[in-house]
Image: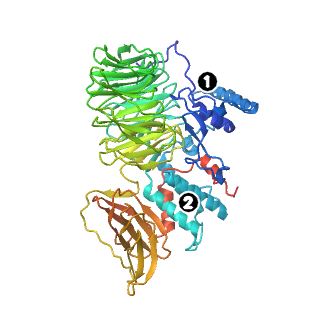
Amino acid sequence: MVGTAGKGETKPENQFDQRGVLRSIAPSCWRHSTKPAPETPLSRVVVQAYAPFRPAGPLNGGKPDSIVVADRDKDQDGGSPWLKAQILGAITLSIGIVVLSWLNPNWRPSSLTSPSDSETARTGFGPAKEANKPLSGTPAAMTPERIRLLLDAARRHVKTGDPVTGALLALPTLPSDGDAPSDDENLAAAHRILYEAHFNRRERLVLAGHVGYVRKAVFSPDGTRMVTASSDRTARLWRVRDGALIAILEGHDDIVWSAAFSPDGKRLATASFDRTVRLWDGADGSREDVLRGHRDKVVAVAFSPDGRRLLSASYDFTARLWDAESGAGIAVLSGHAGKILGASFSPDGNRILTASDDGTARLWNSTTTETLAVLRGHGGGVESARFSADGHRVVTSSTDGTARLWNGATGAPGPILRGHGDQLISARFSPDGSIVATASRDATVRLWNAETGAEAAVLRGHRSWVNDAVFSPDGRQLASVSADWRLRLWDVAPGTLGPAGAVWGGHQNDIIGAVFSPDGRRILTASGDGTARLWDADGAVETKVVRNWSGKFGGTPYSPDGRSVVRPGAGNTARITDAGSGAGRAVLSGHSAPVTSAVFSPDGRRILTGSEDGTARLWQTGSGRVIAVMRGARSSIRAVAFNADGTQAMVLSNNGTLRQYVVFANWRDLAKHVNAAMPRRLTMSQRRQYSLLWGKDE
């Protein structure tokens, strides 16, 4: 069924994100963007970030960065004539870019490289190529003031969940030759920041190369491959193990909005604004078929549980069924009076569920395609509609600020989930169907009892609207993604509900969606910054975790020369005393609960302590400074120890979990490892922001 576009087809819309174009050709207009991009599903605008998220600082001229949030500041609706002239000129130039892109689809303006890293976008190299690049463009000499400012910025990034950027900002502050004094405060600060990144980073891979929003990112059923769909008119197939690019799926003439693997992973389908669905080989990305028939943008695609049929949803008010093997059309599902925003099969494949901006969802018989029920009641468009894992229930979310529960077979109405203060973007069942998680523009995630509709919890922490919230396969964790550029991981297992277990940063724009890997150990995110990122959900990347550990555990509180001893002390401290006289030598303060264990390293230069506060700390023996904090135990620390050569710090928690952390003899070895291990480099805009692009102070 591969063929050329019909005569009646219109030209594709602008493949570039309008705001991205304006940002590249008229930076002064960026903070006063007039309209969201036509492909953006929500009315987003750009305003100044408020101080708690992006604090102002001397390095950026005292101005906070911009972030995407839900509401336009009314004061921005006006503007000076000069500003209006700038915007008009920018729009004119963007129209010219669009026209050129239509005339020559292979043309790209030089400024429209990947928002995450222009060099990576130009070369097409993935993170494996980037990782071993030496730090370049570092100033030959820095004033103490610049070093201090960089370290302050590095601390902020670490504190807000982005240890990778923190480490990349700390590395240039290290001495280039010779040894710094042992009491150098800046070196001590950089040392600790590098250890924070080493122990706590969750970011494994950056999938860079797209030159537009990444709208969708999903794993293959076996978890070995990933596919990303982008507004740059392409999809890309990646290998999970190392982030290697397998294939670029080219052929669509407009935004690729969605993608899905078949249940066996052998096939891949993409849905595009060019009104087509395309089928690809799921292993190598080779093109198989083009499915034509929709008269407007196609925004969703899904395989049936047996993989024999394909379902697509379109803005033309219809959904369509296709034979997944031959590509032949089977049926058109008509009845909605508005755009269909989503469509899915029931777990048994016997029913189809569609969501529409006409304010309804519909249940269909997937064999006869007759309408089984119209789910009415919402006062706004239905943004999403999903079955529970057993297919017995349906949950819908709406722009009216509510979610609703329905009978999955008859469509009979159930409880209404009220409580959010703004429009809902997503609603999902937990794997066992007992909990519903809703994501809203009010910057919260809410958990609900799926049986009664009672509100169970409100998860606060995001600073802008939450685009999605997804459960891990075992239902014990929930990942939420937001327009504040952050991914948050929450413990939601019974009896463990609490603050976010992790806050992860690194994306440079909205995080649009997230999905867990089939084994629950990884999270894949899609972002408006043109990248997808792979995160470690099972523990920090540089930490080895052994559950139910039952081996021997040892360590000595005596220094190698036998002259000193370290033991837990009063007031949440550890105390170093003279082994003979008992006279005090130093007090190690920093834990927030009593210290339970303390040992010297084999060379005596470091001390490791564990505490009831759930952390272990690494200290310099001579100065008594803490150089690293090891988090993640989630329970009181029972014991700590070094291995025989002092290259590993081992932390045993009361829940029986052993964590092994690689430690380094000196800051130089640590810096060398961190520089090689980081999954990305600073973007060009970040290097410019922090004056790291040129070899001189600015």
Count residues near mark 1 (Cα–Cα under 10 Å), then give few for <14, some for 14-19, many for 20+: few
The spot of residue 64 in percent (x, y) is: 62, 46
* Residue type (three-letter) at the residue carrying disc 1: Leu
Outermost residue to the left: 550
* Residue type (three-letter) at the residue carrying disc 2: Leu
Q: Name the residue located 40 percent from the left edge and 46 percent from the top edge.
A: 489
**Left or right of 357, for residue 688:** right
Q: In the rendered image, which quarter contains the C terminus?
A: bottom right
Can residue 324 be seen here? The reply is no
**Left or right of 91, for residue 501:** left
Q: Is residue 252 above or below residue 370?
A: below
Dot 1: what SS?
helix
Q: Nearer the viewer, mark 1 or mark 2?
A: 2
Q: Is residue 494 above or below residue 7?
A: below
Q: Earlier in the sequence, mark 1 or mark 2?
A: 1
Residue on which the image places disc 1: 103
Q: Name the residue located 57 percent from the left edge and 30 percent from the top edge.
A: 16
Count residues near mark 2 (Cα–Cα under 10 Å), then give few for <14, some for 14-19, many for 20+: many
Could you say which quadrant of the image residue 413 lies in? top left
Q: In the rendered image, which quarter contains the N terminus?
A: top left
Dot 2: what SS?
helix
Residue on which the image places disc 2: 171
> Spatial distance from mark 1 to mark 2, Cα to Cα?
45 Å
Q: Nearer the viewer, residue 650 or 417?
A: 417
